[in-house]
Amino acid sequence: MRHCFRAYATDHRLRDIIETGHLTSLNVYPAFGMTHVKAVPMAWRKRVPEYVKDCVPLNQFM
C-alpha cells in the first residue's frame, strides 16, 4: 500500500495511466507494474487515488 500511495503521489505519468483507465500500460511501465496493482486490495484501488487527489498537495512533488 505504501508503495502504491507513494508512486501515485509522485509519478504524474502513473496518475494519468490510472485516471484514464489504461491499466494495460502498466504491463510495460517500469516504475509500477500490474504486480503492484494486484497487491493492493480491490477496495483500496479507487480509494488511494481519490485520497491523493483530495488530501495531498501534488504540486510539492513536481
Image (cartoon, grey):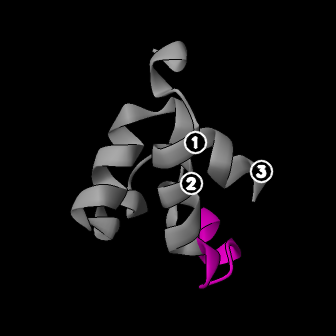
21 relative to 58 in the view: left or right: left
Q: Which marked residue is nearer to the observer: mark 1 or mark 3?
A: 1
Q: Assign a secondary structure to mark 3.
A: helix
Q: Assign a secondary structure to mark 1.
A: helix
Q: Residue 12's image quarter?
A: top left
State the image coordinates of residue 7 (x, y, percent, origin top left).
58, 41
The residue stretch that appears in magenta: 35-44
Which residue in the structure is indicated by mark 1? Answer: 55
> Looking at the image, which is closer to me, 5 or 38?
5
State the image coordinates of residue 24 (x, y, percent, origin top left).
31, 69
**Label ID, residue 51:** 2
Q: Amino acid at mark 1?
A: Cys
Which image quarter holds the N terminus?
Answer: bottom right
The residue positioned 58% from the left and 60% from the top of the image is: 48
Whichever of labels 3 and 2 marks the residue nearer the N terminus, that label is: 3
Circle 2/circle 1 CB separation < 8 Å: yes
Packing grade of label 2 (10 A; few <14, some 14-19, many >=20) is few
Which residue in the structure is indicated by mark 3? Answer: 2
54 relative to 13 in the view: left or right: right
Q: Assign a secondary structure to mark 2.
A: helix
- Which residue sits furthest right? 2
Q: Amino acid at mark 3?
A: Arg
Marks 2 and 1 sit apart, C-alpha to C-alpha, by 6 Å
**In the image, is residue 25 above or below residue 37?**
above
